Image (cartoon, rainbow, N blue to C red):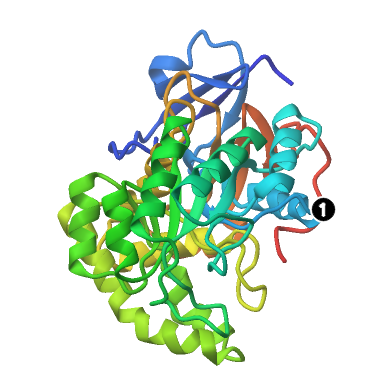
Amino acid sequence: MAEAITVLHGRLIDGTGAEPVEDSAVVVRDGLIEAVGRADELAPGVEAEVIDATGRTVMPGLIEGHAHVSGKHESQRRLRLTLQRGITTVCSVSANTGGIALRDAIDSGDVRGCARLLAGCIVSPTNGHVRFRDADGPWEVRKAVREMVQAGADFIKTAASGGFWGKNEVCAMRNYTYEELAALADEAHAWFRPVVVHCHTQPGLGNCIRAGIDQIHHGAFIDEEAVHGIQERGLHYMPTLSVTCQRNIDALSDQPWQTREMTQAQPVHREGVRLAHEIGVKLAVGTDYPGTPKTWKIGDRTWWELWELVQCGLSPMEAIVAATRTNAEAYGRLDELGTLEPGKRADLIVTSADPLADLPAFQHAESISLVIKDGVVEFADEQYRQHYRIREPQPPDRPQD
């Protein structure tokens, strides 16, 4: 591998929301971004292997903010295929201790060719919607958070309402009380760990906002009070619109206990996101990845979520920022991930499609031409493969499930 790589002449979208740079150069050295700018300013004098991105778009790798990846062997395959779809970081809200081991193996290089994994651990009430470490009452909750931090959790996941998938639950069921949520948030923050919460309805939404939970996930029945509360407290809202999209509802038609409430929530969910965008809520991107294989191929759902956000009023650029810079900020990783700026990890993709003009094109795996993670070319399509070396042989098939 060359000491440095320069991705040259592509149309650059850097993830900050700035206007694209039409003839750009991104210089990568030792796994980090060394310089970003115009090709005529940076290319001369740079000794590097050149990747010609003429006619293509260069942008940060996406961050999937709400995934379910554990330490099972199949998770490695999923993360490999996900990386090939231009998603360079996956935040697993149910990684738990097995996922922590996989995260560490990826970070050390023992497991190669996979998307980066951020590992969340679940602390939830007895009979809660999500389960791993059950804890009831503020002091037991604090102990459970400490145990998960000691195990190596990157963040803590909890629940403040019921959900769709259980036959014996509905979204309106309260999970943790305000007192328990406040203790959980305070304890996690004492160890500098962000907290994400599964929550669809009141009173859980209000309890989460009051307790200072960092990220509100889902909110399928979110109301105006909650949207304004999230904005006033400066929290992040990750709506996971793909959960209540028609494509997902149709795929679960054999599970009417899910689709009944999903159908009811569909318009409410989208009105909430429209309002959130209008008043400046920090919107992030997650999907309950990977989703049912009846309709979702590995990695497709994240790109679909961007299009769902555009249907709710975001511009394509705003949707891209939500899946890159905002997600990195939400997880406390903006100093290293999310944008193409000097000093950050060199996670970027080269695509033949124009995400500002045709986001639906990214439902096709062929739109991704090349993926670089930590400065290493991890995936290249047939055209690039003929000219640029990659670290390991590629599988013959395109990403699919």
Q: Is residue 357 left or right of residue 151?
A: left
Q: Quadrant of residue 197?
A: bottom left
Mark yes or no: residue 356 visible: no
- Left or right: 135 with respect to 386? left
Q: 322 and 213: which one is in front?
A: 213
- Residue 216 drawn at (x, y percent): 37, 56
Residue at (64, 47) in percent of width and height: 83
Left/right of residue 205 with respect to residue 341 in the rendered view: left
Q: Residue at x 39, y 52 (%)?
A: 181
- The residue at which mark 1 appears reads as 73
Please state, as top left, top right, bottom left or bottom right, where the C terminus lies in the image: bottom right
Q: Amino acid at mark 1?
A: His
Image coordinates for residue 163, horizontal then vertical, percent: 48, 74
Q: As displayed, is residue 145 above or below residue 134?
A: above
Residue 269 location (% of width, % of height): 32, 73
Q: Is residue 86 left or right of residue 279?
A: right
